[in-house]
Amino acid sequence: MKKTVLTFAEAKEQGEKLTMLTAYDYSTAKLIDGAGIDAILVGDSLGNVILGYEDTLSVTVEDMIHHGAAVARGAKDALVVIDMPFMSYQTSVYDAVVNAGRLMKEGRAGAVKLEGGTEVCSQIKAITDAGIPVMAHLGLTPQSINAFGGFKVQGKTEAAAKKLVENAIAVQEAGAFAVTLECVPDKLARLVTEKLDIPTIGIGAGAGCDGQVLVYADMLGMFSDFTPKFVRRFANTGQIMTDAFKAYIEAVKDGSYPEEKHTYKIDDDVIEKLY
């Protein structure tokens, strides 16, 4: 059954946990979708995981459309949420609506996600007024990594915690259907979750959120450049893949692959006529 923003609202109302993972390609999205996930995030984390950038800032709208459309083709039931990349919505309300529209039309998104609080509420309202669902993102917002001075837990002081609560209420009032809380202390995330009518999706924000999201390559042990404290590895797929690659190389070099069962036949008399 196709998941929508109503799925999120109903889960919040009924106290059911929501599940979300990232994906950036058709094959991975198809596997995740088939497992029964509620939502797939085409995150601008593809800059790190797929494109090899040091951060998410170099990711373009075209990158998000390209990967988003591939994921959408693989996800039959999950809600596909596509990140709005750096400077695709901060410049103006007009740019925000146009770029969100492109992610919906060309990227086949079911919703878009953008980072920020009160400073982007005008954009959230305009995008939702255009009929495009918006997921907000508070706490550690990777597009602002230079302003933060690194990947740091957010909301630890009284002033910062108060601001985060205010921002969460503001994005809800602006029309967001959900909000991601990243690298926020557990008790603060729990408080925000209790105050909001919309669901919170945590990543490094504790179990008190209404749902969780992880980068699929992190939880599968495929991406080892940097592993955040909050990541739990549910499989060591990276090692399995490395072992398989090595076994393939060895089999080709020693001649044990391909075997006869991997080859196609032709009549001997045809071959003899070619000599």
Image (tube, grey):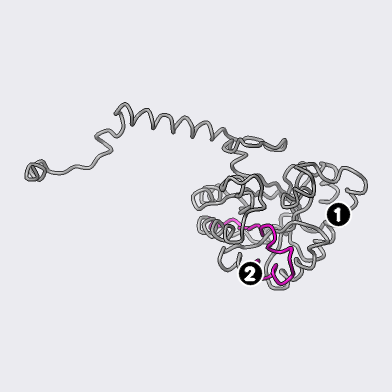
Look at 52% across and 52% down and name the residue there. 25
Q: Which residue is mark 1?
A: 195
Of 143 and 266, nearer the camera is 143
Q: Which residue is mark 2?
A: 101
User: Neighbour class for label 2 at 10 Å: few (<14), some, many (≥20)?
Assistant: many
The percent position of residue 60, horizontal first and vertical second, equals 61, 58
Look at 72% across and 38% down and name the residue there. 230
Name the residue furthest top. Answer: 254
Magenta run includes residue 85: yes
Quarter of image, res 52: top right
Relative height, residue 73 to residue 146 (above, below): below
Q: Which residues are magenta?
A: 75-100
Q: Secondary structure at mark 2?
A: helix
The percent position of residue 88, horizontal first and vertical second, equals 68, 63
Q: Is residue 53 visible?
A: yes
Relative height, residue 157 to residue 64 (above, below): above
Look at 41% across and 29% down and name the residue there. 247
Q: Which of the labelled discs sits on residue 244, or is there none? A: none
